[in-house]
Amino acid sequence: MLPESWKDQLSLVSADDYQIMGNRIPNAVTKLPGLETGDGDGGNGGAWVSKPRRIVVSNQLPLRAHRDISSNKWCFEFDNDSLYLQLKDGFPPETEVVYVGSLNADVSPSEQEDVSQYLLEKFQCVPTFLPCDLLNKYYHGFCKHYLWPIFHYLLPMTQAQGSLFDRSHWKAYTKVNKIFADKISEVLNPDEDYVWIHDYHLMILPTFLRKRFHRIKLGFFLHSPFPSSEIYRTLPVRDEILKGFLNCDLIGFHTFDYARHFLSCCSRMLGLDYESKRGYIGLEYFGRTVSIKILPVGIHMGQIEEIKVAEETAEKVKGLRERFKEKIVMLGVDDLDMFKGISLKFWAMGQLLEQNKELRGKVVLVQITNPARSSGKDVQDVETQIHLIADEVNNKFGRPGSGYKPIVFVNGPVSTLDKVAYYAISECVVVNAVRDGMNLVPYKYTVTRQGSPVLDEALGFGAGDVRKSVIIVSEFIGCSPSLSGAIRVNPWNIDAVTDAMSSAVTMSDKEKNLRHQKHHKYISSHDVAYWSRSYDQDLQRACKDHYNKRFWGVGLGLGFRVVALDPNFRKLGVETIVPAYKKTSSRLILLDYDGTMMDQDSLDKKPSDDLITLLNRLCGDPNNLVFIVSGRGKDPLSKWFGSCANLGLSAEHGYFTRWNSDSPWETTVLPTDLGWKKIAEPVMSHYTEATDGSFIEEKESAMVWHHQEADPSFGSWQAKELLDHLESVLTNEPVVVKRGQHIVEVKPQGVSKGKVVEHLIATMRNSKGKRPDFLLCIGDDRSDEDMFDSIVKHQDVSPIAFAEVFACTVGQKPSKAKYYLDDTPMVINMLEWLASASDKSKDGEQQSKFTFQQGHCRNEIIDL
């Protein structure tokens, strides 16, 4: 059996330290110029350097696949419309990009190995072949019919209104994410590669990867909306998905709203608060900082520009111009699903013609409908509804004799070239989705309307004609915040959409030009390469400290996480501290109370009889000076520990100190005027009245505003506001205003637990002429970090000041302490070992005893 000390050391060894390459494919390497390999080089060979590599993971590979009829062989080509292919333009030069994802083709098991090898060699693609049954449950079952509607704010109240949660579908989702993790493991070099996962299909994949490779450099970008916490909390697997996100180093969102909802969920469900430092938003999660990136994706400018100068595009434009001659064309390009608001758009079109008779026969709404990405009753219902409304509008306002129809359907799939042709002839684009992640249609429309010599000729533009475009955009889609010149509408408000359409038709060319130029400037400078490059740079920044910390795994299944701590941070073992305790003769023991010796969740905070007995045993050792250092007031501490005659108490973070039960309370700082309380109290009372669940705790030296029982988000906002308010009104007072976990505290300057440590050490040094040779300090929260910081400073000034120092925090978390204990029972257990050592040491030897009375230390030699 391994000794306990070995177990403690092994508990700090991360899986990364002993990772076996296995079947992993190595990075390509490049020889450094000017260095050659030869027989006489001493066997060192040439110098090689790895090429940087990015592994892009998505539900589908950026490939098109079809089987050749004549040869019956598979044929593949890159899908130039795929965002995942386009984003490589933002990576550094010479970067190798490997793609992992499913293949949109049914490849038989007998062919899968050959296809995999071919795709890896020719396209740098690693396919994840999914059996049909698994694919249906994962994609059509869980992703599209359950998860996707919820992320778009549609709750499945009944089976008829949407798919209810199905445990078998969730298991399929979990299994597929694990299959992806297996494939990534085959090509991953965890020391160098960066992995970038995309979208809601793979939200628990980070957990599988982090479990295998603790230091993996991992980013995630969500291309769909992230719902508000009220919606997200309805997910039965909400914690598993949220923790999947948090196992990344960087999480990207298109808009602040989506990021804000995610952060709110982290706060409400996991108790995590975010901080913004120098423009970066970060969440502290078990010692790791999970960064948040907010940046909408752009379009591939080169692709649109290339299509704009093609003669084929010009011919298409000429044909469309002739077809819609003397008509004002408004355009809609949408997927066929329930969230694109197509039916609402058609109702608004009908109302436009109803209210404006002069526009009948002149305005046409061309609706390009992309094929649905899934199948089901919801898609059928949407298709049926939009055709019914379109038929109603066309029957009422159409002119059969002239062939005029107000609403013209163009059923997909429609090529990018054909869409560009429609963009070119349209005076306005209408994006009326009720909820959408991003939607790049307005971007592509704007770039197309900027024109080209070929398009200008096809459209009959003259030298004096100005570029113009109008965008009607729903306020509920991701691109809306970046289109400041667009006409924003609430798609549910048919009157507002109708008015927007009317404005677009009647708007002057000058105004159209101003709106167009504003949009084109932004879109052209924030293309897909800009988005990708910015994200990649932030991912590198987020991962730069990976090798400055020690990682190890905690938790089982999808609750797994890694804890990141200082390399020297380790568990405090009995076999380490007890020998040090036995060989020393001047010991200072400092103990926090709440969260350290008393469980934080306990309702009855009074110490148990067993704890009192334990403290008396420690205090009974004449070599020990034991102190409780707490933020609590002196009255409850006096009452609770009155039976511990030799126990020292420090109340209100060190403002009051008592050396033993017979000595009076002293103030460790110069008495201050507490008149500032008359200023702070009314301010705190105002926020208490306005914040349900908050309350004020008034101590003799301090005032504390608590909001742990308030709404997490509202309480946090109020705490920030209260902090600013108090700092403003107390500027000239000798106090410090601090914000802690669920509190805002006002206390006199110079009061902290760190000052307590300095005061006690100084007192012992003045008495004995030296500092204690054994120091144990245990605490669990931010105020205790002041004690650890003070100890570190003392060691820095005089490294030999203490023979043995044990600064220990409770819980595996970032700390200035060098040691940790898991929880309160572990703290009590360790103190029991020390008390037992003291009991056994009473063997009749002469020992040094400290007697403290009224703050004065007297050294006595006694004979036991």
Image (spheres, rainbow, N blue to C red):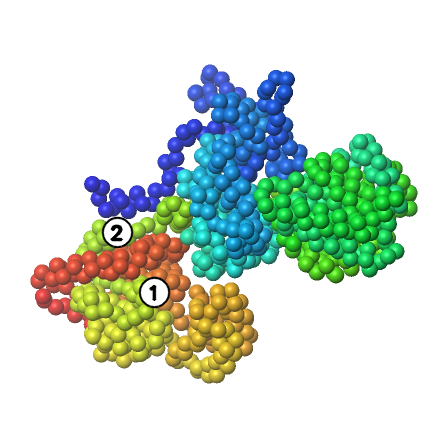
Asked whether residue 301 is in view, the answer is: no
Disc number for residue 48:
none
Asked whether residue 256 is in view, the answer is: yes
Which residue position is annotated with label 2? 573
Quick one: SS at disc 2?
A: loop
Residue at left 27%, top 44%? 7
> Residue 4: where, in percent of width, then height?
23, 46
> Residue 860: where, in percent of width, then height?
16, 70
Within 10 angstroms of label 2, few (less than 14), some, or many (20 or more) residues? some
Kindly indicate the quadrant of the structure image that contains residue 458: top right
Within 10 angstroms of label 1, few (less than 14), some, or many (20 or more) residues? few
Residue at left 85%, top 39%? 323
Residue at left 48%, top 59%? 267
Circle 2 or circle 1, nearest the eye: 1
The reply, left or right, for residue 722 in relation to residue 463 is: left
Which residue position is annotated with label 1? 601
Q: CA distance from mark 2 to mark 1?
A: 25 Å
Looking at the figure, which quarter contains the C terminus? Answer: bottom left
Residue at left 51%, top 23%? 111
Say which of 522 and 693 sits in front.
693
For badge 2, the amino acid type reads: Gly
Quick one: SS at disc 1?
A: loop
| First reached walking from the N terminus: tag 2 or tag 1 | 2
Say which of 408 and 96 sits in front.
408
> Residue 11: where, in percent of width, then height?
31, 45
